[in-house]
Amino acid sequence: MKDIYDYPLTDHNTFGIVAKCHRFIEFCSTDELQTILSGLGCEDYPLLVLGGGSNLLLTKDYPSTVIHSSIKGMEHTAAEDGVLLRVGSGEVWDDVVAYCVSNGWHGAENLSLIPGEVGASAVQNIGAYGSEAKDIIYMVEAMETSTGKTVSFTNAECGYAYRFSKFKGEWKNKYIITYVTYKLSDTFVPNTDYGNIKAELNSRGINNPTAVDLRNVIIDIRNAKLPDPKTEGNAGSFFMNPVVSREKYVELAAEYGNIPHYRIDDRHEKIPAGWLIDCCGWKGRALGRAGVHDKQALVLVNKGGADGTEILNLCNAVRRDVMDKFGIDIHPEVNIV
């Protein structure tokens, strides 16, 4: 267990923002977490539960306590048509995807190379290329911060929606996730309809992709268009793709032509936020030391030495322009603290 005061958080956020917290505590087991919670004082609240820091924008020093899970381990049991894989909340998410693929357990392939840790996958309902964590989450184990009581939630109880769960809403700061159990399938059904996955597979002469093929293609696509946080600080996709009414989409299509979109249902369409931002002329532009990535307009970057306020100012400028041009309010996917 770590328990350090006046702790620097620069290495704990992928934007590389220079900030610190009053106190940093890291736990390696549920017993350690229970001990930690029982000893917290008023000065430790509100707690900030931090994963890999890949979905976080720090705009200032955090005045109270940051808690980080370092619970490791993956164990599986047989289930109907597949396996149940119970994973510690401190495991790196992509290590879990790689483990599943190598063992012939399917359903996580399209979530390859998403940064962050397992606990965050259940909080944020991470997603990419037509898949979301909720598609494979079976159960979430957590500890109630006020009592130290261990609890378990089924997938349905977590209230999953697009980049949302109750852990982000009504349960925010009420629970700390310790383990997540995923249900994976023995049968591989490739999901290649989203983005340019199918085109990339075809360009490689792959007509019947394996899970390994699909994972490799998705990794290559992500690496080609997303900057490495080690060289250019970022939090991946900064904005959520907006879901608009069918009427709004038809209105925009009449004015702007062939807008890329993904049908949600008979009444709603999802429009890529990156396309909206690009149409506003932001791709590759910067405001001081904060910029919009030149290959993917959905990504905001720290061009060197930016603080959180500079990134936030850029975020707000981009949102204003998208609203002015399209009448759509795009919302940050990143947690702003």
Image (tube, rainbow, N blue to C red):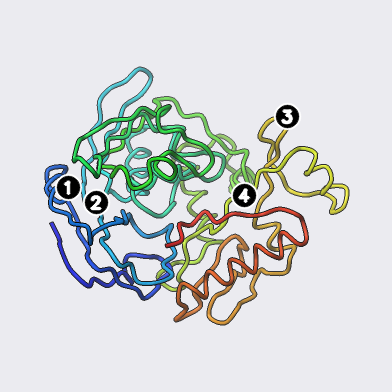
Kind of residue at disc 1: Leu
Q: Residue at position x 45%, y 66% from top? A: 228
Which residue occupies the foreground of this view, 49 or 105? Answer: 49
Which residue occupies the foreground of this view, 234 or 145? Answer: 145
* Kind of element beneath mark 1: helix
* Kind of element beneath mark 4: loop
Frontmost of labels 4 and 1 is 1
Going by the image, does 203 lie left or right of 99? right
Answer with mark 4 or mark 1, whichever residue precedes in sequence: 1
Q: CA distance from mark 4 to mark 1?
A: 35 Å
Answer with mark 2 or mark 4, whichever residue precedes in sequence: 2
Q: Residues within 10 Å of mark 4 (few under 14, many from 20)?
A: many
Q: CA distance from mark 4 to mark 3?
A: 18 Å
Q: Circle 3 sits on which residue?
A: 266
Total number of numbered labels? Answer: 4
Q: Circle 4 sits on which residue?
A: 241
Image quadrant occupied by the N terminus? bottom left
The part of the image, by quadrant, that contains residue 136 is top left
Mark number, residue 191: none
Q: CA distance from mark 1 to mark 2?
A: 9 Å
On the image, the x and y values in percent for residue 125 come to 45, 42
* Kind of element beneath mark 3: loop
* Kind of element beneath mark 2: strand
Q: Circle 2 sits on which residue?
A: 69
Q: Circle 1 sits on which residue?
A: 33
Q: Is residue 272 above or below residue 250?
A: below
Answer with mark 1 or mark 2, whichever residue precedes in sequence: 1
Kind of residue at disc 2: Ser
Going by the image, does 128 lie left or right of 58? right
Kind of residue at disc 3: Asp
